[in-house]
Image (cartoon, rainbow, N blue to C red):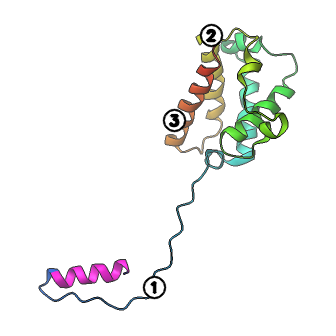
Amino acid sequence: MTDTATQTQAQDAAAGGCATPQATPAAEPRAAPRRVAPYELLGGETALRTLVDRFYDIMDSAPEAATIRAMHGRDLSGIRQKLFEWLSGWLGGPPLFAQRTGSVCITAAHKPYAIDAAARDEWMFCMHKALDDLPDLDPRFREALEKALLGVADFMRNR
């Protein structure tokens, strides 16, 4: 029964009338709501590339990120691509990192570096500033994304 028919019957009953079923066409099956991946909510490949590039630009120039900048080589192009690929899959987009490496594990790559709470906070500083350059993000999505990214950054701690 359609919502309109149900509403009409409810109005009839409320008015003291006799609600009788009305002929309605067979209801079409409803498709399950489409789940939108965080990758899409972010803005897809273009927005993710912007985020990663800004992240490393900030890390490369901000004194607040000096400790984590020192953990990287002079040329950041390779690590930019790796973070882009990893975040793509993590956000529900193309699993580029896993396709290239066969794994999504990134903790082993971080073991040689002393990552403590201060380093985690520097990483989050860069990410927060980079997210500022995506002004069209829904504030609730951004808050949830930053919380999830903090979880990832905290998981990388080894000190």
Image quadrant where one finds the N terminus: bottom left
Secondary structure beneath label 1: loop
Q: Position of residue 97 (x, y in %)?
A: 79, 36
Q: Position of residue 129 (x, y in %)?
A: 63, 28
User: Which residue appears at 61% of the width and 33% of the height?
Assistant: 132
* Label 1: how many Cα within 10 Å (few below 14, some 14–19, many 20+): few
Q: Main secondary structure of the magenta part?
A: helix
The reply to whether the magenta stretch includes residue 7 is yes
* Kind of residue at disc 1: Ala
Q: Can you see residue 125?
A: no
Q: Position of residue 125 (x, y in %)?
A: 62, 21
Mark 3 or 2: the one toward you: 2
In this rendered view, identify the residue nearer to me: 147 or 22: 22
| Segment tinted magenta in the rendering | 2-13
List the residue tagged with mark 1.
26
* Kind of residue at disc 2: Asp
Does 58 appear above or below 67? below
List the residue tagged with mark 3.
143
User: Which residue appears at 71% of the width and 21% of the height?
Assistant: 107
Q: Position of residue 8 (x, y in %)?
A: 27, 83
List the residue tagged with mark 2.
116
Mark 3 or 1: the one toward you: 1
* Label 2: how many Cα within 10 Å (few below 14, some 14–19, many 20+): some
Q: Can you see residue 64?
A: yes
Choose the circle earlier in sequence order: 3 or 1. Answer: 1
Secondary structure beneath label 3: helix
User: Which residue appears at 21% of the width and 81% of the height?
Assistant: 11
In this rendered view, identify the residue nearer to me: 52 or 98: 98
